[in-house]
Image (cartoon, rainbow, N blue to C red):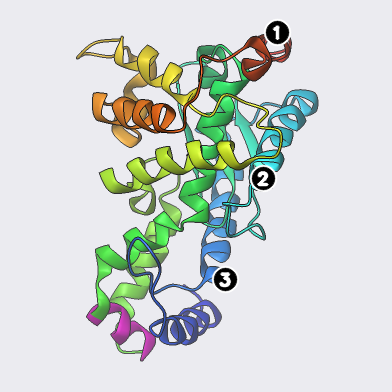
Amino acid sequence: MTNRLFFFLSVSLFGSLLYGCSGGVDLFSKQQDIQFGQQMQATIANDPVHYPVLNNPTLTNYIQGLVNRIVQSPNVMNKDFNYKVTVIHDDKTVNAFTLPGGPIYVYTGLLKYVDNEATLSGILAHEVTHADHRHSTKQMTKQYGLQEVTQLALGNNSSLAGQIATGLAGVGENAAMMKFSRDDETEADANSFDDLMALPGRPWYPAAINYFEIKALGSGAKPPDALTKLFATHPPSQDRLDAIKAKAQAAGLQPPMEAQLNTATYQRYRAMLP
């Protein structure tokens, strides 16, 4: 870690000790979320073997448009984060992940697995929540602890600075900062529903993420290889499924019309996948 970055971390961390966040304490500043995400983006971009980017501007812009609309929900707090979509050309992985500060990565395997636009939008809203609620840096705060981070802020813990630098290099779903807790996953599901419910005109069925949960859970106790990373990072469960069902019932939602699923449009864009 460079002296400049270490100084930035120290000053920002010391200042952020004064603040708490709903859903858990976060000792890192919003600017650090953005900085961490930018560093990890750069690492991903320099590793095309593990993260081959799909060069299809039409398809990427379509997905970006869905995210842009989700971010307009009045429930999204950090609208200034960079919710940029990147599509990873990997049909063998059914998953998506989010970096601190907003960047969202979607695998082609997920796009081929999903059946309609509403379901994809529910998944994207789930990923937006991970960034918007700053789950990554809350996990880092929990991992390193108040005392350790305080020492870092005072310039007395160079070993922790090295750990953070190493963590930033460990990009992808296996990075420590993206191993979200069960509470994080539950919150991301709940806010996916709430964000879509609050959108003007309610363009998508807010509970459509459950179509994905049902399909994934239907794979049984031993999911196929394509779902391995999904089960490691966003494990589907009956509890998650039931929680969304309960929210849909409490909201009085009726079964969706095709206009709320937008299957035809999604299938047209999905056909662009190689």
Q: Nearer the viewer, residue 123 or 158?
A: 123
Q: What secondary structure is found at the residue carrying circle 1?
A: helix
Tell me the tag on residue 264.
1
Note whether 19 is above or below 248 in the view shown.
below
For disc 2, the neighbor class at 10 Å (few under 14, some 14 to 19, many from 20) is some
Compute the Cα span from label 1 to label 3: 40 Å
Amino acid type for the residue under numbered disc 2:
Lys
Q: Which residue is mark 3?
A: 31
Q: Is residue 49 visible?
A: no
Q: Does residue 91 appear anywhere in the picture?
A: yes
Q: Quadrant of the C terminus?
A: top right
Disc 2 element: loop
In the foreground, 94 or 195: 195
Residue type marked 3:
Gln
Say which label, 1 or 3, has the lower sequence index.
3
What's the magenta region? 147-154
Task: Specify the farthest residue to the right.
Answer: 58
Tag shown at residue 161:
none
Residue type at mark 1: give it. Answer: Ala
Say which residue appears at 32% left-offset and 12% top-offset. Answer: 224
**Earlier sequence position, callout 2 versus callout 1:** 2
Q: Main secondary structure of the magenta part?
A: helix
Mark 3, Cα crowd under 10 Å, few <14 / some 14-19 / many 20+, is: few
* Residue furthest out toward the left: 221
Callout 3: helix, strand or loop? helix
Task: Compare marks 2 and 3 and give the one earlier in the sequence.
Answer: 3
In the image, is residue 20 above or below residue 178? Answer: below
**Mark 1, other Cα within 10 Å: few <14 / some 14–19 / many ≥20:** some
The residue carrying mark 2 is: 84
Q: Nearer the viewer, residue 223 or 48?
A: 223
Query: Does the segment drawn in magenta span residue 151?
Result: yes
Rendered location of residue 154, percent (x, y): 36, 91
